[in-house]
Amino acid sequence: MTWKALSASGLVLAAALVAVPAQAATGQVVTKVSEQDRETALAHWTPERMKSVGDGDLPPAEQISKPYEGAAPGVGRLFMSTSTGQDHSCTATVVPSETKDVVLTAGHCVNGGLDRWDNPIKILNVVFVPGYDHGAKNGVFAARAFAWSDTYTGPTSGLDDDAVIALDPVDGRHVQDVAGSQDVSFDTVASPVDTTILGYPVSQLAKGEALLSCARPATLKVNSVLSAWETDCDLAGGASGGPWLRGFDPATGRGTIFSVTSRGSTNGDLVTTDLSGAAFSEAVEALYVSADDL
């Protein structure tokens, strides 16, 4: 059993999803969020509502991944809801930018695609909570815009499953100044590579309330459709968008992002058996470079 684009609460998005642009830019799909909608998002995500994303029937606890202890600069939990009335969460990471307002996550975390009747599913109420740990510790940052490359065709695709989000400052402070950041690189990486993956899986282990880590070698797999990194990490849904870090230093909690969690497989007991993350492409590099313009 394969989960295609696993987000929030471990729910799999509908099978026929494709990207639905809200506003198009050259080579990218951009969504701008009005000031009123940003205020609505902040009001929507109360501490109680954030916690409730982990309510209900959840997949079993991870066995390979463990609770992460120590610093994890820039890593946080991403919350969003859909026009169909569901609340979800993913993982995102602050990356260096001139505006100091940019986070990197998976495309399917902010691309709702279509429902079974081919109606657009809008993504609403997008906020980022850096260093989330059983609640917000460092503020709640509303998204003012988000974008993905037009080479990403929606949640059924693993190609270029990446997105950038521009956040509003909180009390005049930019998220990068508040939370720090992780380096990101688009250089070619030799395979296999020792990898630390971080995320907020909504499973029985932590219910999305705490950061988990998985340290495993990742191997690059290439076929006619895409190039993707694969590993046997068992992080559950909600870890989508979390950073894949090489050169990770446990003392500082920092490394270099070379992919983000995109897709994976589960067995009959809903235990994740592997994860994959798309290899960064020129289109994704261009997306990152232009993120300051959001």
Image (spheres, grey):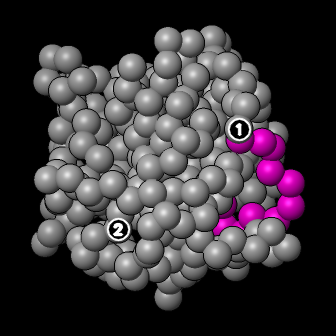
89 or 212: which is nearer to us?
A: 212
Are circles 2 and 1 on residues that touch, CB within 8 Å? no
* Magenta stretch encompasses residue 271: no
- Residue 29 appears in view: no
Is disc 1 surrounded by few (<14), some (14 to 19) or many (20+) residues within 10 Å? some
- Indicate the position of residue 59 as horizontal and vertical percent values: 62, 19
69 or 143: which is nearer to us?
A: 69
Give the Cα distance between marks 2 and 1.
26 Å
Task: Name the image quarter holding the N terminus.
Answer: top left
Label 1: which residue?
64
Label 2: which residue?
280
Is disc 2 surrounded by few (<14), some (14 to 19) or many (20+) residues within 10 Å? many
- Indicate the position of residue 107 as horizontal and vertical percent values: 35, 51
Secondary structure mainly formed by the magenta segment:
loop
Could you tell me which residue is drawn at 58 percent across and 57 percent down? 217
- Indicate the position of residue 168 as horizontal and vertical percent values: 54, 67
Q: Give the image quarter of residue 215.
A: bottom right
Element marked by disc 1: loop
- Residue 14 appears in view: yes
Could you tell me which residue is drawn at 76 percent across and 28 percent down? 205
Name the amino acid, label 1: Ile
Highlighted magenta segment, given as a residue range: 65-77
Label located before the other in sequence (2 or 1): 1
Instruction: Using residue 73 as the reference point, say whether residue 270 is left or right of it.
Output: left
